[in-house]
Amino acid sequence: MRYVEVHIYEEYEALLKEHERKWVLITGFPGFGYVGTIATRYLANKMKSVKIGDIITKYMPDFVAIEEYGVMTPYEIFLARDKDLIIIVNNALPSTPERVPYSLALAEWFKKINGSRAIFAGGLNIKLKEGDEEFRWVCNMDCEWSFKEPTLGRGNYIVGPLATLYTIFTIKKIPTLLILPYTEPGKYDPSAAAVFIRKLNEVLNTDIPVGDLIEYSKLVAYAEALMEEASKKVREDKGPKLYM
């Protein structure tokens, strides 16, 4: 069963369908360095965006948290209206069986609202670093964005849900830029997220400061702790009960 719903709050549905808009979608996942989630949550906050919906999946992690804007859910949709930006904040990884349905639902919805281009944030293992560059990048089709820094080299793999999403966006012919700052895979890395934000400023002509990223990454760490606690509780509830 393919059950993934991109749910937009009713008051924003008409706005997203305005034909003169050329929406740019920005997203990432809590992968290497947690770069995608740190960067997108920070971006949504700094751009004073509003939450306009959620992505609902069949096996969605069962956790929420209370934030200033309301309820934080696993997969959130924000809108920075004055910049024509849609920011998807993934506070959790879609389960493996849901990654293709998730990617298909997001790509099809984005095309339905006349989305133009996308930018994805991810982390690249620092062991692959060859020079003094801070990141690598790759652009499918003709996304019209580029950098002087080297692109992702041949033989280097992108893995996980980011790879699935990039594949589906390519198949659906959505021009997409992938920015991959170098990072330590097992650590929260706000400095890598700052690299992504600085590169984003270059291509979108924005001026988002990065000075608060260290403090902001603590919120991301807190969100992951909540998710892990919830997942642990589910595992315990499903496990055998021992009585003494």
Image (cartoon, grey):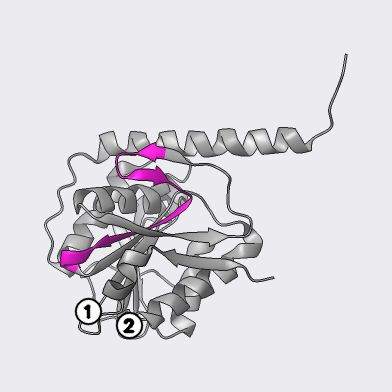
Residue identifier under label 1: 21
Which residue is pictured at 25% across the width and 84% down the height?
19
Residue identifier under label 2: 114
> What kind of element bears circle 2?
loop
Q: Please say whether residue 156 is visible from this viewpoint.
A: no
Picture layout, residue 101 above or below residue 50: below
Please tell me whether the stretch drawn in magenta is mainly helix, strand or loop: strand
Amino acid type, callout 1: Arg
Q: Is residue 76 left or right of residue 19?
A: right
Q: Nearer the viewer, residue 182 or 107?
A: 107
Which residue is pictured at 20% across the width and 52% down the height?
48
Earlier along the polypeptide chain: callout 1 or callout 2?
1
Q: Is residue 115 left or right of residue 63?
A: left
Segment colored magenta: 66-83
Which residue is pictured at 28% across the width and 62% down the height?
79
> What kind of element bears circle 1?
loop
